[in-house]
Image: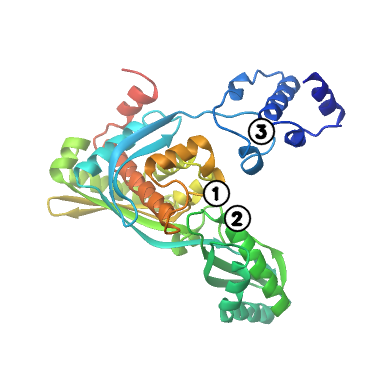
Amino acid sequence: MDEYLAKIRSGDLKLYALEKSMPADDAVSLRRKYIEEETGTDLSAVGTYSIPIDRVVTRNIENMIGCVQIPLGVAGPLAVKGEYASGKYWLPLATTEGALVASINRGCGAITKAGGAEVRILRDGMTRAPVFAARSVSHAAEVARWAEDNLLLLKVAAEETTNHGELIGLTTYTAGTSVFIRFEFDTKDAMGMNMATLASEAAAHLIEEETGAKLIAVSGNMCCDKKPSAINIIEGRGKTVSAGVFLSDELVASVFKTNSATLAEVNTRKNLTGSARAASLGFNAQAANVVAAMFIACGQDPAHVVEGSNAITTVDMAEGGVYVSVTLPSLQVGTVGGGTSIATQNANLTMLGVAGGAENPGDNAKAFAEIVAAGVLAGELSLLGALGAQHLGKAHRELGRGEK
């Protein structure tokens, strides 16, 4: 190790290239040792991990020095009545926020007692939007029209880059001499960002050849990836999914210690009016909490919590109770690719019955999206109930601070 450390210090051996000279675990250990010496920090805690890393260091991370462990809890069972997910599920939730799993667990109990959450996927399409430079506004209009008129040609070019993805549509936008073409893809069981990028790049080169427009960037931010945006709320990105459940007055009272009218008023004044007054893009109580905890547990890209939490929660008064629903316009999930093959994350997907590619491609990712949406519904119900009963502070004192 001392010999290798000397080579790193001299520059003869690059820190990022250690895996080319030794087994992955040895490379990670050596890199960690070097960083410990450079920073004067004991990093032994991050050097303890159970996951096999040969694949991880080639596909998931660079300059690896170890793993950060996040506590993993479960909530459930949660009854889901979807078109792809049907049954009772234990939700894996990775978080450091005390009281969160308990809150979701209470929501799961209420939904299951009510007979389950009905869930539907309303739209499914991953987007990528290259930006082109045109010579003039009239040329920009020509470029946009050519793309709209030649979807089939673009489809052939795009699908030559993938064995599974399909180009299912496009929308054009212009701003002066800038032309944005928002491609939409069916990426089956993959979340599909890389797939969409490669396919969009191929289609973009064809547009360049046929129109004389210059491709500036394969992503022009009309996609819109990992940023709050109205376009993803309106047009959707990934899965657009809704989950809902009817709760009787008796169930609201017994589980949440409040009443249906209060539940509805809290939602209206907090999630709807409060969010509107704040000009928030999310009209919900805590959707990001559930999305983030499940994303981390199941190998999803955590940055997509930005889009996944763009949810709206509604509470409708109904005879004998309330109907509560959540709609997530831009939930981006996959069961193959990315972090889904890491051993611990794959175990959680397996627990949900959605790991890997489905026999009918796309069904596992859709089932996972339905389960996540039902989990978000559980979290929304529980927090609305806690607020309605004035129990939120008490729960965080007891669970978040460990006070009894």
Query: Residue 337's mark?
Result: 1
Q: Earlier in the sequence, mark 2 or mark 3?
A: 3
Identify residue type, mark 2.
Answer: Asn
| Distance CA(mark 2)–CA(mark 3) | 22 Å
Residue located at (46% from left, 61% from top): 236
Q: Quadrant of residue 376?
A: top left
Q: Pointer 2: residues within 10 angstroms few (<14), some, or many (20+)?
A: some
Q: Is residue 94 above or below residue 279?
A: above
Name the spot of residue 99 as percent of width and height, x first: 36, 30
Mark 2, secondary structure of its residue: helix
Q: Give whichever of 349, 116 is nearer the camera.
A: 349
Q: Give whichever of 133, 387 is nearer the camera.
A: 133
Query: Residue 194's mark?
Result: 2
Q: Which residue is mark 3?
A: 64
Q: Earlier in the sequence, mark 1 or mark 3?
A: 3
Residue ranking furthest to the front: 359
Q: Is residue 18 above or below residue 316?
A: above
In what quadrant of the picture does the C terminus appear? Answer: top left
